[in-house]
Image: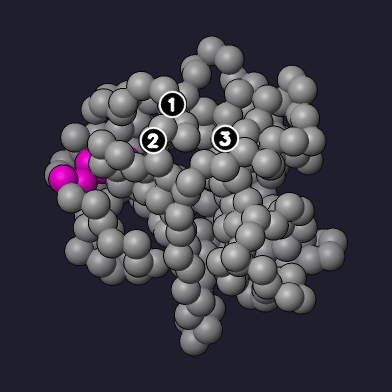
Amino acid sequence: MRFLFVLCFNLGLMAADGVLLSGFAKTAPPLEADPTGALWRKAPMVVAAQDRYGKPLPEARTEIRSLWTGDDLYFLFSSKYESMYLRPVAQPEKETHGLWDFDVVEVFIGDDLKRINLYKEFEVSPRGEWVDLDIDKSKMNADGWKWDSGFTFKTRIDEAAKIWHCVMKIPWKSIAAAAPKAGQEFRLNLYRIEGGPEPRKYITWQAVQSPSFHTPEAFGRLRLKK
């Protein structure tokens, strides 16, 4: 099976393959990296458990849930791990360029369904280091990481279960100029990197069939549900 996908039932709604439904939350969920929370238990979910070329990686199963409000978009990653490769000295107080050389979870999202080279990238490490980037793949300019989205996040490592959790809260204004509405779709892919140096595990929701995560023609979709 090329794409591994878990259907999640939310008030009787089912997503199509390659689509992550984001459930509407009337009140903002607390910024807690806990999938057992009341709102998160009902949130739509997909699974990333394959490498860049679609080879199954069941030992690296990563569950991703999503919620949205009028102000923000939320993602919650729950990542099963065998080992961790972390920066020797964490600096969560400032943006970490090159964070992708270590363990991270990543969201790539774009609001323009036609200009697929334009999208935003959000990364968080198990210890709460972060980077956000404004990407124009046609240019891949080195200054994209200097963009500031204002996103916030929280992480938690469950060493007993060997799962680490990360919740991201991304302001809509950093993704799109217009306010979000039910039924709207965005281009999306979800990634994770585990271990290092090579060989590493490059875990994907939608396989990109390329060495690079920056393959926007392989992205799936995020659809906002009411």
**For residue 198, above or below residue 110:** below
Q: Which residue is mark 1?
A: 176
Residue at x-position 67% and y-position 49%:
51
Asked whether the viewer can see residue 78, the reply is: no
Q: Residues within 10 Å of mark 1 (few under 14, many from 20)?
A: some
Q: Amino acid at mark 1?
A: Ala
Instruction: Depth check: give the residue in front, 61 or 178.
Output: 178
* Residue 120, numbered circle: 3
Crowd band around label 2 with a 10 angstrom C-alpha radius: few (<14), some (14–19), many (20+): many
Q: Position of residue 35 (x, y in %)?
A: 33, 65
Left or right relative to 77: residue 139: right
Residue 66 visible: yes
Q: Nearer the viewer, residue 9 or 92?
A: 92
Q: Does 198 sit above or below residue 112? A: below
Residue 141: in magenta span: no
- Label 3 to label 2: alpha-carbon separation: 11 Å
Q: In this orientation, which residue lies closer to the viewer: 26 or 219?
A: 26
Residue at the spot of label 2: 172
Q: Quadrant of residue 104?
A: bottom right
- C-beta proximity under 8 Å, tags 3 and 2: no
Q: Are marks 3 and 1 in contact (CB under 8 Å)?
A: no
Q: Please provide the residue range marked out in magenta.
A: 22-26
